[in-house]
Amino acid sequence: MSPSDDREIQHNPEEKIFRDVFDEDLIDDVAAESFFTRSRMIFSGRSKKIYWLLLLIYFAILAVLVWTAVSFFQADAIKDMVFWGISTLFGGVVIVAFELWFWMEMNRNSLLREVKRLELQVSLLREENKPDA
């Protein structure tokens, strides 16, 4: 594509949107998104304060999990070992729940972006096939 083509697209934004939506390279790039790109996208939406708070809670629970695991191995009595073991198990379940929730949010964001892209494709095709009145 030459620079003159870029100038023409700048004057016609609908053409740029159409090319971006139907560009096969773009579709392959979206499909090959990395984990870090998807996870960064979570922290850029309307609910980013909530996500940051949950991430802070996640790390606090992770620290408690490590502390309970170390305490389990340092316990002398069986009663203490049971307490620290159950605490460690509960902390592990909470950590897994947080991770599952974050994964579901990443998938929801990806799905929402694809639905919006499909909506754009449908509206552009409808405009293209619209009979002139």
Image (spheres, grey):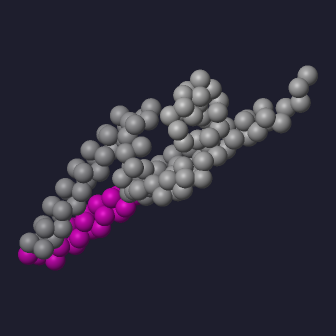
Left or right: where 72 falls relative to 24? left
Q: Position of residue 32 (x, y in %)?
A: 48, 58
User: Is residue 126 something that shows in the picture?
Assistant: yes
Residue 80 sits inside the magenta stretch: yes
Q: Relative to residue 107, is residue 14 depicted above or below?
A: above
Relative to the observer, which residue lies in front, 60 or 121? 121
Q: Residue at x 60, y 48 (%)?
A: 23
Residue 12 sits inside the magenta stretch: no
Q: Residue at x 54, y 31 (%)?
A: 4
Q: Position of residue 45 (x, y in %)?
A: 44, 35
Q: Position of residue 65 (x, y in %)?
A: 22, 61
User: Is residue 90 something that shows in the picture?
Assistant: no
Left or right: where 125 falls relative to 57? right
Considering the whole magenta stretch, tell me its main secondary structure.
Answer: helix
Left or right: where 7 falls relative to 41? right
Chain part drawn in magenta: 76-98
Q: Position of residue 97 (x, y in %)?
A: 40, 58
Relative to the observer, which residue lies in front, 16 or 32? 16
Quarter of the rendering containing residue 133: top right
